[in-house]
Image (tube, grey):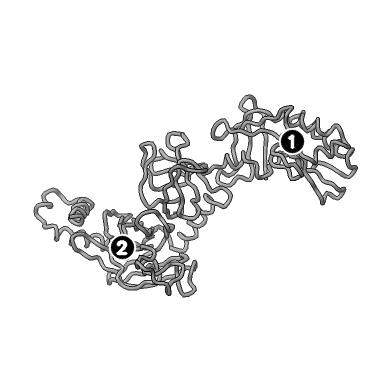
Amino acid sequence: MGMMALAISLTGCVRLEEDDLFDESAALRIEHTGDDVQRLLVNAPYGWVMQYHTGTGVSVFEGFNLFAKFEQSGKVTLAGNHKYLRDGNANKYTEASSLYQLIREDGLVLAFNTWNDVLTPFVDPVAPYAAPDNLLKDGAGMQGDQNLVITSYNDKEVIMRGERYGAEVRLVKADRAWADYIADTESMKNSITNSTITSYYLTAGGRDTLYYVGLRGGKYRKSDRVNDPLRVDSISCCFTPNGFRNEHSDEVSGHRFQEFTLSEDKSCLVNEDGTVKVIPMWDTYIVTRTTLWKLDPEAFTEEQQQLYAQMDEAFKVYNKNASIASVGLGRSSGGGAVNGLVVTFYTNAKKTQSNTCGLSMTFTRPRFGEINIDSSEASTIDNNLKSIGGRSAELEPLVRKFAATLNGTYTMVPNDYFLPTGAVFTSVSDATKLVLSK
């Protein structure tokens, strides 16, 4: 029954006239559909990108970009550089030829029906991390399929599902040489994912709705919150030269999405109709202060310039060879470390040795892209500032005065939304700017 429904679906794809539905038998319609798909597969100058997924339920493996070039004779050349390639080829670009067939039964099935070094490791009933010697008890292996039921197609793509395990597999017509596609995809992946920022907002209508965590691995989690989530869904995706595509279509706040591309301003990834955004949690990365962000003296106000010079003189009272290296926001490194204003200072005349001292400040996030900075009389100092203040009594009051000049709420604009190495904070009450860099 399901295959008959598929046949009807395929009939719709090729847009047969209504009269044809009655003039042709189901078998003949499938035959004609098969001819159309055969012509489509063969007539692709760069071949096809195969976005290949495995498994039936919770995603265990990432999505894989394979490549296919079909010939009229029934020969297919597959290529890939995935980590499950055998015989010493793991993560190396590999091509392998085998046979394919379009099986016309109750529906249309694209069958890769002979062994292929690129595809068959996903289908082989062995443990993927101990192949080929460890046969799994249930023979499932990676739960990959080599018989793919065609569910829809057009001139640019063919959508299929695994006949046994049901994962979605998509053929999309390649628009460039395979080596270029691999290089461009890897470049995009590295520009939108990294080991520092691993969490993303999934938003619709401008609200922080859900979160993506661990995107870089190609298998990641969608959750209701980053820490201690109540609900977690596992998702498999394939990276593309423009972004990434999930195995399945999904929905948030009434908006559907499956594929995301990098926005023109490179601040986020947007879905097909621009209603859903994937935004890296760069704002949390900056606010957390695990990294020391230095303030650019060129952007100091006149008052800050004067205080900076006075602090430099106060260090010389403590040690004639000492001088300020930078003032920044982050975590001090001395005993009793604090999060707040951090003064890095050289301890020798050659400026080859340095240390830090700090005053605690409070950093809060009123809303996305904003930060509130606050210091008060209750702000604590670390042990280094206490020690230096014992010799140079003016230093602590000067540090507190400098910190007070930073109090306020700012909008934050990073220089790179996916991995900031700098940012500009602009006061919401006036034109004051803080320019920061790592």
Report, in whole angstroms, how far the alpha carbon at label 1 lies from the one at label 2. Answer: 68 Å
Q: Nearer the viewer, residue 211 or 280?
A: 211
Q: Nearer the viewer, residue 59 or 43?
A: 59
Above or below, comparing residue 359 to residue 377 in the picture: below
Mark closest to the chain's N terminus, 1 or 2: 2
The residue at 57%/39% (across/down) is 283
Q: Residue 52 at what x, y percent from top left?
A: 38, 59
The residue at 42%/37% (across/down) is 204
Q: Nearer the viewer, residue 141 or 99?
A: 141
The residue beneath circle 2 is 43
Q: What secondary structure is marked by label 2?
A: loop
Q: Quadrant of the C terminus?
A: top right
Residue 277's quadrant in the figure?
top left
Residue 38's quadrant in the figure?
bottom left
Q: Callout 1, which amino acid?
A: Leu
User: Left or right of 286: which side holds 297?
Assistant: right
